[in-house]
Amino acid sequence: MNRLLKNLKQIGMVLMIGLLCVSCAYAPALETNPWETITLDTDATFADVAFTDDKNHGWLVGTKASLFETLDGGDTWQSKTLDIQEKERITFTGVSFYGDEGWVTGEPSILLHTTDGGENWQRILLSDKLPGAPNDIIALAPSTAEMVTNLGAIYETKDGGKTWQGLVEGAVGVARNINRSPSGKYVAVSARGNFYSTWQPGDTEWTPHQRNSSRRLQNMGFLDDDRLWLIARGGQIQLSKSNDFENWQEPINPEFSTSWGFLDMAKGAGNQLWLAGGSGNLLVSEDNGLTWLKDRDIETVASNLYKVVFSGEDQGFVLGQRGILLKYNPSKNTTVIEEETT
């Protein structure tokens, strides 16, 4: 009898430990969902969004030459058609505005420019010798922008795109993704996620860095204070201790049950860090990544979430596939699906 009771106690302890492990595997639920779900009439995957000085006037770009304009802060979007040959083959990769002057990059080798808020777009011809295809662009001042290609070639124009000056002597090679900091630093993840490279103003070449774990890199970027963030395969993230490119904090697993992985991260309102991934995976931390809450309402959204963009503390978007767009609206407590027709 004593032996039977002992065995039952051991089984009970194992079950309790198992239940505790399961509960730890899932991030607690976010109490209130601050995101509205908007479905646009397109099957495109969105790549970037940007606004003019007027926070109501913005542009959204993506695959299949998709170009959408909003005049109400992102509540509704209208599709815009450009006179470009072979539209189905074109993927717009980046958009940026300085006032009413805007730029759009795309593949294969396309660059658009507007000086009137997007009422008219002009295509800027690029050299056949350009290393790679335009991957992203940042509007810095009137007639001034900085463009990076998918091979890590960085160019600057100060005359509205008529001429370009190379800022780095050598390209970094095929990159999975490339991100720029507010101060002009860049970080690029290699195509296979084996290593990452950095560049900062004044450097003549990219500097390679070995990853600090056995997990391959998925994406990297910068916080507002120039610290790096890192997403590794298998749902793991890291934040740098300072703006040093190799000084990292301990790895964080926001949700141990996550097997599909995360894809992008960005700073939101206040101290919020928003983390997006596959299968409607969206989490937030309000304590610099120490603890995480999961937005369970967004789990029902049938889309991978590829990019998080905040253009201000009260204006943010999460970009998905098949026309799915999340709009940050903390004043609303429910997720609303809107079908857009154009």
Image: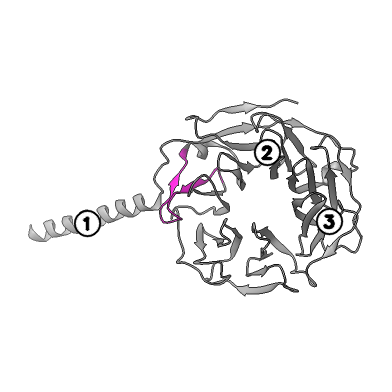
Task: Tell which tag, 2 or 1, sits nearer the viewer.
Answer: 2
Instruction: Tell me the SS state at disc 3.
Output: loop
Dot in front, 2 or 3: 3
Looking at marks 2 and 3 on the same chain, the residue that comes earlier in the sequence is marked by 3
Which residue is disc 1 drawn over?
13
Scheme by which the image is coloured: one colour
Residue behind mark 3: 158
Of mark 3 and mark 1, the one earlier in the sequence is 1
Q: Identify the image quadrant of residue 51.
A: top right
- Disc sitting over residue 315 in the figure: none
> Judging from the image, what secondary structure is the residue with disc 2 in?
loop
Residue highlighted by disc 2: 322
* C-alpha separation, residue under disc 3 versus residue under disc 1: 69 Å
The amino acid at mark 1 is Met
The reply, left or right, for residue 251 in relation to residue 225 is left
Q: Position of residue 175 (x, y in %)?
A: 71, 63
